[in-house]
Image: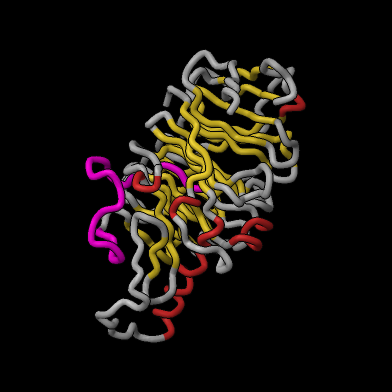
Amino acid sequence: MPEPRRLRGHKATATCCISSRDRPGLIASSGEDGCICWFDMRCKDVVFILDVGNDPISSLCFKPGNEDVIHVSMGSEVKMFDVKLAASWKCLQIYNYNKEEINQIACNSRSSFLAAGDDGGDVKIIDINQHCLYKTLRAGHLSICSSVQFLPWRAWEAITGGFDSKLVMWDFSKGRPYKILDFGAPDPNCGVSTGQSLNPAFVHAIAVPEVDIADRLGKVCALARGDGVVDIIDIESERETVRSKTRSKPQKRSQARAGGNTLCADSEAQDLNGRKKMQLDYSLGGHTAAASCVAFSMFGEKGKLIVSGGNDKMVKIWDWSRYFNADQTNSNGDLMHLNINLNRK
């Protein structure tokens, strides 16, 4: 395998990196130096560097449908820029609704709302057409909200992850959660923890597939956890459990498990409601330290692979799609697609 290409431009730690969906090969990165670096993979060097302030930049996101517009989070503010005006680099809009430092921002697929999760556990939903605060999502997290994503196949729903080891599913039009998954609690499908015993299962990052990928491979989300596990959660199955509980009282579960083939850390956990959850951990060749980032592949067959990075200096590429495909057989050796050692976190 050829050596990974290193993109150089920042004078301090790089904090965020995003790739264009409309223009393959275009990459934007941010850093603690308060700069945004613009890379074109067809070029040898950085295309241009945009100095947007003295404060570290924690997160970036493109505006879907117009990727010349980019949103930037710095401290407790979100700023909007147009890269076509890079010569003057005038800020088009500033949103300062968060009270604490923002960890991640995300824009929904219709470019109508922007979400910003902060250190206080709050998530601000901002109407970027009317330039006003739409909703504040609170009481979902007990501590830092580290990650946030909209569900592109459900116009009024979002998911957030936090350092309380929880994944929260929100109806943001109502401003309240409809499901909370606690990864710090014992796994009911498995008698032992699937993660690293010394590291808490903080949710460091969340990824959701685009609509075309979700329609083809499944409406899921991927989570990078502090205990090194990468989780794949079937969002629609989780929603169905909520609807089932509201329609009828839960029936007493049988003590016996059907099938006799309970797979926990190895591959796929399935409860009596038929819900699927895949856990990719160190027993499968996964991360041996905290998994810090995760994304669905935008190359080849889009979404077929999941890419995760960790504090073990490794990038793991997983072929997850076979476990949500009834035609595929379950083979643990087929999950790990590629290992890349970067020698740095």
**Residue drawn at point x = 25 percent, y = 59 percent:** 186
What span is in magenta? 186-207
* Residue 190 on the magenta span: yes
Quadrant for residue 292, please give it: top left
Q: Nearer the viewer, residue 281 or 125?
A: 281
**Residue drawn at point x = 36 percent, y = 60 percent:** 181
Seen in the picture, residue 166 relative to 116 is either above or below; the reply is below
**Residue drawn at point x = 46 percent, y = 40 percent:** 98
Res. 317 visible in picture: yes
Where, quadrant-wise, is the C terminus in this rendering? top left
Q: Nearer the viewer, residue 185 or 118?
A: 185
Q: Is residue 22 left or right of residue 49?
A: right
Q: Where residue 221 appears, x then y in whole percent?
A: 51, 55
Quadrant for residue 131, please give it: top right
**Residue drawn at point x = 77 percent, y = 27 percent:** 84
Q: Where residue 187 appears, x then y in whole percent?
A: 28, 61
Where, quadrant-wise, is the N terminus in this rendering? top right
